[in-house]
Image (tube, rainbow, N blue to C red):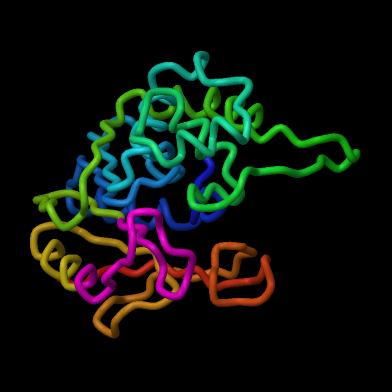
Amino acid sequence: MKYMGSKARIAKHILPIMLAECEKHGITTWVEPFIGGANMIDKVPDTFERIGYDLNDHVIHALIDVRDRPNDLFDIFSKELRDVHKKDKAKTLYSHACIATSFGSDLKGGYARGKSSDGSPRNYLAEAKRNALKQSPKIQKVDFICDSYENLSFENCLVYADPPYQGTTGYITGAFDHDKFFEWCREQAKKNVVFVSEYNAPEDFECVWQGEIKTNFSSTRKKATHNAVEKLFKVKP
């Protein structure tokens, strides 16, 4: 599912690094405290127990619908409907439509409009449904749970955290305390293997991969699209 900060483009680079650590330590449970569009966990072999959490209940409802009823997702969803339901509580089918028709997949943003290369109107909702039909078989055994990372603790798991990045577009759930999050990662690393995607991290977090990507995921730059250096950090136990 398309969502802010998707790791679909770099999964092929960073997933093998994390799977190698799983094999090294005999880990068979994969957890993500910030599941987003599930564009990493859907590529993790289903031999793993896979669990995805997110504090945004709209995201969790949308992913459950992608997993369980992709054929039922809306084909038509107007701006007027989105204006009502994006402010409402998460709801079956409606949450996915609200995200799919959001500019930049940001629920706080406006209604997505655009044109295809041939000049015809771009149908974001139809694109999202096609993507859902492709993704659904890959997440059949994934558990999706609405909860904050602060309430979670794991043991003998691979923990992959993709939090809101420092200096980028804030999430609908509000301000994010990065220092508190980094301390949580240190605590989890005592009983798990923990990786974090970020642009920067504290000195005791080891950068194990980096690569430049084009992104529009930022609120601190004048240009809508820019190049950024994505990094994968391993938290030292």
Please indicate whether residue 22 sits to the left or right of residue 60 in the image: left
Quadrant for the C terminus, please: bottom left
Image-based side of 124 in relation to 5, left or right: right
| Residue 116 pos. (x, y %) | 82, 40
Image quarter of residue 201 = bottom left
Q: Does the magenta stretch include residue 220?
A: no
Where is residue 183 shown, x and y percent of the image? 17, 72
- Residue appearing at x 13%, y 61% in the figure: 188
Q: Residue at x 54, y 22 (%)?
A: 133
129 over 58 or under it: above or below: above
**Residue 214, position in %: x, y?**
64, 64
Identify which residue is drawn at 41% across, 32% down: 62
In the image, 70 versus 185, the foreground residue is 70
Q: Is residue 174 magenta?
A: yes
Q: At 20% from the left edge and 59% from the top edge, which residue is drawn?
A: 193
Question: Which quadrant would residue 37 be assigned to in this image?
Answer: top left
Looking at the image, the residue that sits furthest to the right is: 118
Between residue 88 and residue 100, name the one nearer to us.
88
The picture places residue 58, in percent across and down from the top left corner, at 37, 38
Magenta stretch bounds: 161-182
Q: How many discs mark residues in the rendered view?
A: 0
Observer-nearest residue: 136 or 108?
108
User: Chief secondary structure of the magenta span?
Assistant: loop
